[in-house]
Image: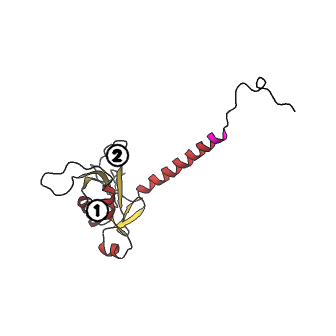
């Protein structure tokens, strides 16, 4: 069989579709995994009812809000699917990590505002935290989360509540 000369070859080359299909499948898998990981930030719990509850303020595209979930059944605090505690005995025993230590590490990745005149240390962190607590849980755990945030200079906190009346129609 004779080779085709340059004049006889197809004038338009045909694109190779296999690499493009591979890239599309990789993108689909990537977005499926990312969407599953974003669901880890919010635990399934019953929020307390508040008739004045408002939607959280919109944030800039790059600004993230750290979701802290205070669980009812065991008083554990979950962030991104990982359990933390504020109980010094459980931390010392190595059963759970310290929430305050975790928040300190997280806050270092955020900018700080100007220091308050006369106060020691750096200014408040620009990190935003949303605390979601189970309605049947002890408020002491919620207070401990607020204290851990305050010790790490995190003052942009909000408390999640449900506007749906549990006893209503």
Q: Earlier in the sequence, mark 2 or mark 1?
A: 2
Under circle 2, the secondary element is loop
Q: Are marks 2 and 1 in contact (CB under 8 Å)?
A: no
Q: Position of residue 141 (x, y in %)?
A: 29, 65
Q: Which residue is mark 1?
A: 145
Closest to the observer: 44 or 129?
129
Q: Residue furthest top?
A: 7
Residue range corresponding to the magenta coloring: 4-20
Q: Residue furthest right?
A: 1
Front residue (pair 130, 20): 20
Q: Position of residue 22 (x, y in %)?
A: 62, 44
| Above or below: residue 43 compared with residue 63 | below
Query: Does 43 appear in magenta?
Result: no
Residue at left offset 58%, top offset 47%: 26
- For disc 2, the marked residue is 63
Dot 1, crowdedness within 10 Å: few (<14), some or many (≥20)?
A: many
Q: If the image is split into quadrants, where does the N terminus sit?
A: top right
The colour scheme of the drawn protein is: secondary structure
Q: Nearer the viewer, mark 2 or mark 1?
A: 2
Q: CA–CA distance between discs 2 and 1? A: 21 Å
Structural crowding at the residue carrying mark 2, measured as other residues with C-alpha within 10 Å and reported as few (<14), some (14–19) or many (≥20): few
Residue 48, percent across and down? Answer: 32, 57
Instruction: Judge whether residue 10 is colored magenta.
Output: yes
Give x and y (percent) for residue 93: 36, 76
Q: Is residue 108 visible?
A: yes
Is the stretch drawn in magenta largely helix, strand or loop?
Answer: loop
Asked where in the image residue 140 lies, by quadrant, the reply is: bottom left
Indicate left or right for 37 with 54 as reference. Answer: right
């Amino acid at each position: 069989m004779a080779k085709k000369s340059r004049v006889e070859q197809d004038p338009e080359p045909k694109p190779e579709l296999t690499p493009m299909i591979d890239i599309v499948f990789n993108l689909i898998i990537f977005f499926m995994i990312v969407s599953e990981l974003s669901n880890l930030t919010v635990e399934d719990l019953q929020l307390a009812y508040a008739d004045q509850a408002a939607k959280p303020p919109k944030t800039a595209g790059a600004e993230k809000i750290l979701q802290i979930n205070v669980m009812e059944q065991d008083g554990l605090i979950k962030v991104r699917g990982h359990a933390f505690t504020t109980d010094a005995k459980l931390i010392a025993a190595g059963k759970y990590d310290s929430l305050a230590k975790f928040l300190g590490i997280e806050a270092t990745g955020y900018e700080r505002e100007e220091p308050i005149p006369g106060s020691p240390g750096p200014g408040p962190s620009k990190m935003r935290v949303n605390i979601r607590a189970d309605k049947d849980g002890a408020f002491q755990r919620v207070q401990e989360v607020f204290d851990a945030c305050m010790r790490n200079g995190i003052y942009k906190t909000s408390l999640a509540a449900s506007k749906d009346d549990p006893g209503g129609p």
